[in-house]
Amino acid sequence: MPRLLPTACIQTCPRPDFDSAIDEMTPLVGEALASGARFIALPEYCGGLRSDGPLLVPPSAPETSHPVLSAVSEMARKGKVWILLGSIAVDGPGGRMFNRGFLIDDTGVPVARYDKLHMFDIQLSKDRVYRESAVIAPGSKAVTAEAPFARVGMTICYDLRFPGLYRDLAKAGAEILTVPAAFVAATGKAHWHVLNRARAIENGCFVVSPCATGSVPGGGETYGHSLIIDPWGTVLADAGEGPGVAIAELDLDMVGTTRDRIPSLSHGRHYEFSAMSKVKVA
């Protein structure tokens, strides 16, 4: 029997607080459920996001009492569906927060959590600077989680630019790589599709990448274009711009057949690095 998984990416706009974030995602999750989705993925900072100059300032709460985690867990329980809660800000040490994602099972129980490893500290131009690490503490662990349909490798947004992480997740058995994001529009136009397709192709994995869309309260634009990509690099669904749902059916047997055709996961070789100097030609 084919291993088919109806999957949905939820595309929301950044909202300044928990209540408005929950209000926006709830009908979109309902739309995904009505379509028959068995796996639903939400974007990075889907529980709220504001900007203050170079700082991204999401509303935060302790994990044990986080209203967005509670709300999404209840959506999963009522809908009897697995949900990737892309990320929310969770209270952390020293006044900073964790940018934490959760995989929630169809009984509403979080079965895995992942803290974003790589901080978005960049300078796009003289006037466009981002310093995520000023308010977010980086994680330290790569995470895969076993679901009934597949092993899932969890990442978040800027992690996408570090291909070694995805190779390690694939080698650990991940068949689906998740990339919830709030990609900024300027980099999204140039890099979003290319990077997501590359991670799918080089690892022979499905890539499920829900992305925020539209303006960030306080300034900034997110790119949208939530993507579902197969192991051959084909874009199965693209949500475009604006809030909505991208839906596709994953044929999970394609992971094995693609890796059999191009077994790059097993072809990697250890090598020594030599810093070359000028070579004299005899």
Image: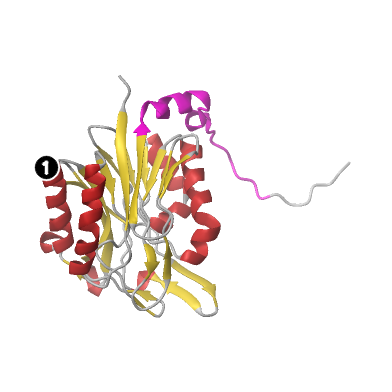
Give the percent coordinates (x, y) of residue 258.
47, 28
In this picture, is 169 found above or below 223? Answer: above
222 or 128: nearer the viewer: 222
29 or 254: nearer the viewer: 29
Disc 1 designates what residue? 107
Region in magenta: 250-275
The figure's colour scheme reads secondary structure
Does residue 182 show up magenta in the picture? no
In this picture, is 130 found above or below 2? Answer: below
Q: In the picture, residue 70 is in which quadrant?
A: bottom left
143 or 189: nearer the viewer: 189
Quick check: can you spot residue 113?
no
Give the percent coordinates (x, y) of residue 236.
43, 40
SS for dot 1: loop
Name the image quarter holding the C terminus: top right
Give the percent coordinates (x, y) of residue 184.
45, 65
Left or right relative to 282: residue 83: left
Q: Residue at x 37, y 50 (%)?
A: 179
Give the percent coordinates (x, y) of residue 140.
32, 55
* Number of numbered labels in the structure image: 1
Look at label 1 and name its amino acid.
Answer: Thr
